[in-house]
Image (spheres, rainbow, N blue to C red):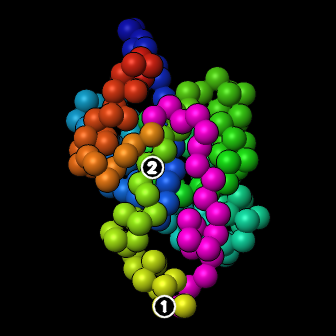
Amino acid sequence: MTHTAKAQGATIWLTGLPSAGKTTIARILAGRLRSENHRVEVLDGDEIRRFLSAGLGFSREDRNTNVQRIGLVAEVLARNGVLAVVPVIAPYADSREAVRKRHEVSGTPYIEVHVATPVEVCAERDVKGLYARQAAGQLTGLTGVDDPYEPPLDPAIALKTQGETPEESADAVYAVLAERGLV
């Protein structure tokens, strides 16, 4: 009986402001990885919030709980040979650091990607209308506007999406995975 080598999993964590392009890049990257027969799951922050984190608000404590739940699911998938692609705002550095440590403890690769789109560009894109609602006084606690976003100090890669296509951003992340022997 022949045994195939266990696929190496990893978590690819895309952090950035609302409308930075995280989910678009994640979906393009996931499509490319699937086309190469990698096992891939996209853990979209919005979907997780609706199901796994239903009932949580947007206080610092609730945001931290949400990120830790997503981090746990990503690490379990990655530890079991899945490439977990995680587009989630995750505004707080300490929260992301706890996720990184969880991966270190299990010896699971963790690639932090900063989708470093400036807030002005995100506000122009305003995919979900959040910036417009905030400007109209209908929404408070918008990350990067009236709630903090702590950018990663040492990401594996920072994507300047205002100067490249989502495909180019996804290719840049793919290049980091290739460099680290994960694809």
The quarter of the picture where the C terminus appears is top left
Q: Which quadrant of the figure has residue 108?
A: top right
Q: Main secondary structure of the magenta part?
A: loop
Q: Residue at x 37, y 46 (%)?
A: 160
> How far across and down, in percent of the image, does residue 102 sit?
70, 36
Q: As shown in the figure, which amino acid type bears the numbered disc 2?
A: Ala
How far apart marks 1 and 2 lie (CA) works out to 25 Å
- Image height of 134 relative to 48, above or below: below
> Where is residue 77 shown, x and y percent of the image?
54, 39
Helix, strand or loop at disc 2? Answer: loop
What residue type is disc 1 on? Ala
Answer yes or no: is residue 84 visible: no
Horizontally, residue 183 falls left or right of residue 168, namely right
Instruction: Name the outermost residue toward the right.
Output: 61
Q: Which residues are magenta?
A: 138-157
Query: Label 2: which residue?
Result: 116
Relative to 125, 138 lies left or right: right
> Residue 141 or 170: which is nearer the viewer?
141
Q: To which quarter of the image does residue 80 belong?
A: top right
Circle nearer the N terminus (1, 2): 2
Residue denoted by label 1: 136
In the structure shown, which secondary structural element does the residue marked by tag 1 occupy?
A: loop
Indicate the quadrant where residue 140 lies.
Answer: bottom right
Residue 10 part of the magenta segment: no
Residue found at the far top of this picture? 1
Q: Position of residue 6 (x, y in %)?
A: 46, 19
Query: Where is the N terminus found, in terms of image quarters?
Result: top left
